[in-house]
Image (tube, grey):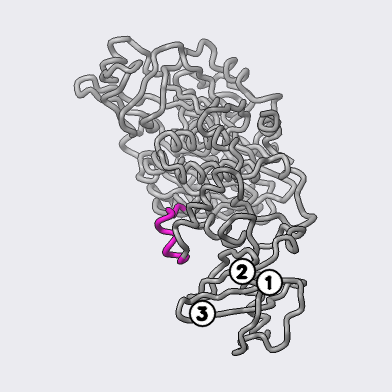
Amino acid sequence: MNQQNGLLTIAEASTLIESGHFMSIAGDETALRKLPPGHWIGGTIPYFIGSEGGVTTKDRVYVQLIECFAQPPRLSLRATDELPAICHEAPDNGYTLLIIPAFSEAHRLFAENAPNYEEMYMKPLVGWIAGVHLAELGTRKPLVVLGETLEFSDDKAAVIDVALPDHRYAQVEIVNPFRAAPTPAIRFPTSGFSAGACEIDGQARNFAEYLVSHQLDSRLPLVADYCGALINVSIRHIDLENGQVDFYAPVFAGTEYRMASPLTDYVRTFAAALPGALYQPEFACNCVLNFLYSELEGKQAGAIGGPMTFGEIGYQLLNQTMALLTIGE
Amino acid sequence: MKPEDWLHKALGINPPWQISHLIENLSTSRLDVWVSLERPKSGWFFSQRPSAPEHTLPVWRHLNIGNFKCHIHANPVEAGRHNNLGWIGDDGQPFTRAMVQLIGAHFLAGLSIQAVCPLLDIPAADVWKLKHNLDNGRTSLNAPAPLGDSPAVDHIIPEASHAIWQQLLSGEFNLDIRVLSLKLLMTKLREQVLRIQDSEVHTLKAHELQRYFVRHAHLLAHELEQINRI
């Protein structure tokens, strides 16, 4: 991975853009709007893991260069109704990187339907959900940007399709520091971003009431086992009065969940969960909830940096997980 | 291109094979075509004089020519050494390999038997026979590999009709999976197979799983080693 990747000043990022590089960029809206046009896509977020550790900044942007490709990557903004074809239209050998604004219809529909997209899992798909500073929730909108036109959007997905040389291949991996606790199995009768009714070890319960009565830590996600892949669903809000729990990703009916075990040392647990020896991915992102709950601001947080986002994409929407893209030979 | 050459091309019949006899029935929209290595007699094409083809040969329903249902008569012994021919069928099968491929493509696109039959103007009974043969591994939806062109990796991936794929989807066999995309795909397909009772759909899902393995074989040495040990 190029040493020019990472948390850069506007001037440094602008130089890279004006040099003709292809890249994805994460940064606060005010920072992104200062960048020149070029071969980049971007999304808003002010939280990062940089070389100095956890950082919240609106003055710098996180750049991840795309340097391995067989032909110039294709950059675009995709409307919501174009997302189901995103894998079908992806390069036959390569990968697709996409950024979707949080709380948009594109976000909701991708989260609910991505597993059933045509060619899903056949072609590598990675990315993240753009957000805002948490103090600005409700006053500013998450945005994505197509650098070639400097068009900003709150309801489209910014996409880069990268075709790789024949002797290279892309691989998406995730690093989930959480493990399912030995607690009752939880199932939901319907899929969605919120839930009321559930089954706890086969017994009908209200999920909000269950969480509160058992004093379960809502900072811990639900964890589901997908043939060995541990997939989180993070809890956003518990409304005990109305018996509803909102999530940062949808729960799926028919899937068995368990509460996650607490993390005692996020950084050490994360480092231990990394696959194999230390290596530099082509792309990486992590979750703002990990940034907050593990209090990573100002702390060293491992060698793999990137934006700390409102959701990660490793084929499908993920929570509290690192998503990585590597290029193999 | 001469009309007779065009007909050869349309039916996928290439040298040294040639159409030796042809009988058309306008009232039933049926075309019977005899294929052999023999040189055709001059003047047979569109000849008004009835030819004397051999009626004891096996017959397979082939790809349609316009509104005409095409049936191929051929000697499987003569063609047997050449297992990449799409215009001939397997022993006991109702369709040529090319027609099986076409029917399979419709299934893989999500069409039911009830939808495929009128589209291709083929008898449902024959399609059910094909389906039975697929389920029992007596024929395959895979395209026949060209002679002398079998990638090394393919021979360790069971054909799509092999029972192992459905056994993986049903959970009868489990793999230790290292690749994320396979973990997610397997989870999705297993949930679908559990929820949908239609065996035709199960076959399609098995084919989808096999296609994933063929596409990503370079990543799946660990998983394929387990499959080969089963």
Task: Return the residue at label 1.
Answer: B35
Q: Amino acid at mark 3?
A: Asn
Percent of width and height locating residue A210: 29, 15
Residue contact at pointers 1 and 2, CB within 8 angstroms: yes
Q: Which residues are magenta?
A: B110-121
Percent of width and height locating residue B30: 51, 75
Q: Chain of mark 2?
A: B
Q: Residues within 10 Å of mark 3 (few under 14, many from 20)?
A: few
Q: Write down the quadrant of residue A247 in the picture.
A: top left
Q: Is residue A271 left or right of residue B68?
A: right
- In percent of the image, x 33 and y 26: which residue is there? A188
Q: Earlier in the sequence, mark 2 or mark 3?
A: 3
Task: Return the residue at label 2.
Answer: B72
Which quarter of the image is occupied by the N terminus of chain A?
top right
Magenta highlight on residue B112:
yes
Can residue A126 be seen by looking at this rendering?
A: yes
Q: Residues within 10 Å of mark 2 (few under 14, many from 20)?
A: many
Q: Which mark is residue A121?
A: none
Q: Earlier in the sequence, mark 1 or mark 2?
A: 1
Measure how far apart labels 2 and 3 are at the Cα level: 14 Å
- In percent of the image, x 48 and y 77: which residue is there? B29
Q: How many marks?
A: 3
Q: Chain of mark 1?
A: B
Percent of width and height locating residue A81: 39, 53
